[in-house]
């Protein structure tokens, strides 16, 4: 059994799979400029785009994502070739881990953590002056598993909870404990009330670049943006403009429109940006759960059983 990981990022995923399946040969396709190996049983896309050309070279029997996102896989091409495509559900420890990280980014921005760390090194006591999360309006755009996990934490911290979703209804308001819920068509009314916007939506054709200059301008002045979902949801130039002009007070970003984000990206030089390297879901607990699902499907492929959680 041969498994091909796309790229050298997220290295602990390979180590964990090799530990679980010592008889499986794990290979790495290091970069998109090289030709991938062929005759692969399982292709794990990670952050690589997987189109028809790649499928014809690699000839995988299964495309299995390490996690939930399949936006880089051409599902129609896989369907035409009879290649099953599967991912791992977001619910469970992955959603809980991402929710914790989103909360970390929020609190780090409000309490100006980078400046506070610099003041420790400079011997400055009693500065900077931070802000409390309690009482602030936090908008969860997209009401899925991660948003639900985050809502539970935010309620405990006495934040005011708003939601944006395609179909707002009473059960969602009750389940998430929302103070108000808006449809996507009513987003401007919601964003005008928002202190912290947290992106919890999936990336698809309709949401790619959705958070552009127009949407950012709808937020009340001095609001914050948190993105632990997908970088391509946000127009990077528009975000840089809003942050550099002071229209937004800050951004907490775990994902970027290009990954890995270049070290010289001007956004990273802004003092009101807190960035982490796509680690919101990278916890021991989350990875154990993901590994369980991936291993189960590899074993099912070996034994000829139906693949679980198929998209194709």
Image (tube, rainbow, N blue to C red):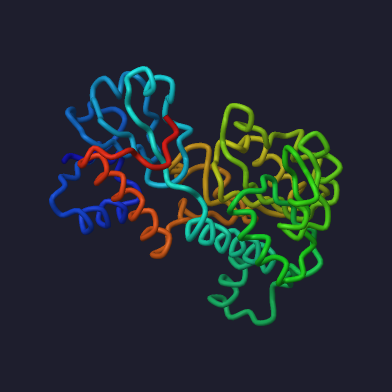
Q: Which of 197 and 265 is in front in this view?
A: 197
Left or right? Give the position of 191 relative to 198: right
Quarter of image, res 118: bottom right
Q: Where is residue 130 in the image (x, y as percent from the top left)?
A: 72, 70
Left or right? Give the position of 101 relative to 181: left
Quarter of image, res 260: top left
Q: As drawn, which residue projects farthest toward the left? A: 23
Q: Where is residue 212 in the image (x, y as percent from the top left)?
A: 69, 34
Above or below, 301 against 223 in this view is above
For the point 39% across and 22% down, which residue is it? 79
Left or right? Give the position of 160 relative to 268: right
Quarter of image, res 131: bottom right
Above or below, 85 against 256 in this view is above
Q: How many labels does the image show?
A: 0
Identify the image quadrant of the N terminus: top left
Q: Position of residue 2 (x, y in %)?
A: 17, 39
For the point 46% across and 52% down, which residue is it? 277
Identify the image quadrant of the C terminus: top left
For the point 15% across and 54% down, which residue is it? 22
Left or right? Give the position of 134 relative to 241: right
Q: Position of residue 182 (x, y in %)?
A: 81, 44
Q: Which of 85 and 215 is in front in this view?
A: 85
Q: Which of 84 and 149 is in front in this view?
A: 84
């Amino acid at each position: 059994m041969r498994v091909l990981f796309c790229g050298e990022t997220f290295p602990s995923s390979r180590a964990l799979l090799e530990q679980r399946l010592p008889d499986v040969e794990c290979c790495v396709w290091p970069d998109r400029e090289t030709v991938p190996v062929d005759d692969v049983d399982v292709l794990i896309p990670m952050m690589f785009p997987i189109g028809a050309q790649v499928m014809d070279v690699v000839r995988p029997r299964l495309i299995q994502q390490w996690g939930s996102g399949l936006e880089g896989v051409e599902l129609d091409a896989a369907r035409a070739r009879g290649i099953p495509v599967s991912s791992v559900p977001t619910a469970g420890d992955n959603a809980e881990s991402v929710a914790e990280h989103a909360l970390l980014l929020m609190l780090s921005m409000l309490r100006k953590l980078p400046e506070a760390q610099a003041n420790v090194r400079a011997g400055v006591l009693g500065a900077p002056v931070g802000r409390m999360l309690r009482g602030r309006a936090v908008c969860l755009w997209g009401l899925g598993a991660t948003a639900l996990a985050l809502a539970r934490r935010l309620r405990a911290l006495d934040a005011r909870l708003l939601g944006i979703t395609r179909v707002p209804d009473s059960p969602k308001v009750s389940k998430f404990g929302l103070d108000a819920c808006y449809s996507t068509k009513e987003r401007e009314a919601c964003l005008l009330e928002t202190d912290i916007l947290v992106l919890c939506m999936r990336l698809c054709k309709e949401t790619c670049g959705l958070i552009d200059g127009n949407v950012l301008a709808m937020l009340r002045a001095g609001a914050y943006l948190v993105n632990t979902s997908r970088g391509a949801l946000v127009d990077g130039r528009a975000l840089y403009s809003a942050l550099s002009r002071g229209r937004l007070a800050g951004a907490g970003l775990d994902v970027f429109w290009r990954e890995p984000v270049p070290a010289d990206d001007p956004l990273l030089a802004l003092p009101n940006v807190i960035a982490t390297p796509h680690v919101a879901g990278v916890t021991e607990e989350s990875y154990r759960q993901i590994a369980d699902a991936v291993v189960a499907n590899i074993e099912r492929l070996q034994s000829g059983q139906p693949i679980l959680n198929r998209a194709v």
